[in-house]
Amino acid sequence: MAVNKHYCQGTNCHTNTTQDRFQKSTGMLRGRYAYATFNNQRFVNDNFIIFCSNGCLIDWVNEHTQDIINQRPINFITQRRTSEGYEKVKDNHWNSHSIQKINQNSQE
């Protein structure tokens, strides 16, 4: 069954290190789905049909302001973006986990 949501259009959504974006089996961060479905009448004129959060909306506006002013087309993201090379690291002091980028140079 196809998901009835767009992928978040945020320019940095796939690089934010949060638990829900991290896929442990591949070590990748994935962009989220937009917050609202595109047939939800409550969000018809809302930004959450194409963004997962206000942070992603602001990132997108900051990235594309000059394109909007100069009336240049902006490509719509149709595939989930990913960032590779992350791992979950346990902090023994607080007994918690964090997601960190793997240092490629230290693996030589």
Image (cartoon, rainbow, N blue to C red):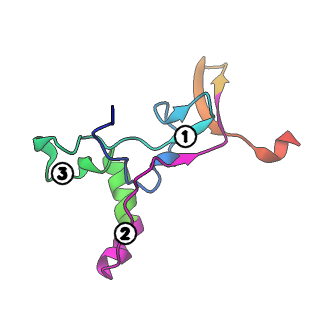
Q: Nearer the viewer, mark 3 or mark 2?
A: 2
x%, y% of residue 11? 44, 57
Give me the disc on residue 88.
none
Give me the disc on residue 74.
2
Residue shown at 50% from the left, 49% from the top:
81
x%, y% of residue 86? 64, 38
Give the answer, above or below, for where 79 lies relative to 90.
below
Q: Amino acid at mark 3?
A: Asp
| Inter-mark Cα distance, 3 to 2 | 19 Å
Mark 3 crowd level (few <14, some 14–19, many ≥20, 10 Å Cα)? few
Seen from this angle, which residue lies furthest front?
A: 1
Q: Which residue is mark 3?
A: 46
* Mark 1 secondary-structure assignment: strand
**Magenta region, residue range:** 63-88
Residue shown at 32% from the left, 47% from the top:
6
Residue shown at 38% from the left, 69% from the top:
64
Mark 1 crowd level (few <14, some 14–19, many ≥20, 10 Å Cα)? many
Q: First in sequence, mark 3 or 1: give its number.
A: 1
Q: Left or right of 96: which side holds 72?
A: left
Which of the two residues, 21 or 77, is positioned nearer the viewer here? Answer: 77
Q: Nearer the viewer, mark 1 or mark 2?
A: 2
Q: Amino acid at mark 1?
A: Leu
Given contact means CB atoms under 8 Å apart, are the residues at marks 3 and 1 in contact?
A: no
Badge count:
3
